Image (cartoon, coloured by chain):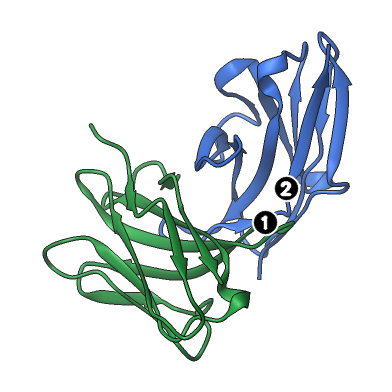
Amino acid sequence: NAGVMQNPRHLVRRRGQEARLRCSPMKGHSHVYWYRQLPEEGLKFMVYLQKENIIDESGMPKERFSAEFPKEGPSILRIQQVVRGDSAAYFCASSPRSQGPPEQYFGPGTRLTVT
Amino acid sequence: AQSVTQLGSHVSVSEGALVLLRCNYSSSVPPYLFWYVQYPNQGLQLLLKYTSAATLVKGINGFEAEFKKSETSFHLTKPSAHMSDAAEYFCAVRTGANSKLTFGKGITLSVRP
């Protein structure tokens, strides 16, 4: 069973460009979470999605950031008009649909650098 | 609201010594608690979890943690440190079966030969 996949692993963007980060959850998992890790800080929750639904976006910045998890295909975290402060590692996690163990399984992350 | 406090940012131990990484949490409902490990430039790997069963939880790589409700703590221990344990360790809390994880700031563990 393949783990959570994220791509690209590294992404360099100039200020003002758009960044698209992709996440494929583990097989059979329908819950996806995005977290951001800034230097010297822990991970901060951004958004929680199920297929075609945003369940909790309380951690998303109000502007420039959006997320989706379509019926088919990976979850996408999109950052428009990137700024230097967006440089961070972005992690995706998934969990299964059932009421079983509540842990989340993390992908390897996408490290975004804004120049 | 839920929160996690990991005091200090760096712990250094000698190889073979006891590892103790502290975690205190705040939660208005019975929590799920987790310890994750992160190696450089990698994602997070689950070490162990507390889900209201046994209060002493054993995880991978010889780590264990004890849930103490009276102290709102979930400290991580390992009797004998190994060089390969050098990494960053995060404590996290979650309330409800399908909700966000709230992480502490993490502790970097160094192991001296």
Looking at the rendering, in which quadrant would you find the N terminus of chain A?
top left
Quickly name the residue at label 1: A42
Query: Could you give the CA–CA distance between mark 2 and mark 1, rounded to whole angstroms?
Result: 6 Å
Residue B21 sits in quarter: top right
The x, y position of residue B91, in whole percent, is 67, 45
A32 vs B111, left or right, is left
A38 vs A104, left or right, is right
Chain corresponding to green in the figure: A
* For residue A6, above or below residue B13: below
Q: Chain of mark 2?
A: B
Which residue: 77% across, 32% down?
B109
Q: Total number of numbered labels?
A: 2
Mark 2 in CB contact with mark 1 (< 8 angstroms): yes
Chain B tint in image: blue
A50 vs B78, left or right, is left
B37, B69: nearer the viewer: B37
**Tag 1's secondary structure?**
loop
Report the amino acid beneath label 1.
Answer: Gly
Can residue B99 be seen in this snapshot? no
Quickly name the residue at label 2: B106
A49, A99: nearer the viewer: A49
Can residue B95 be seen in this snapshot? yes
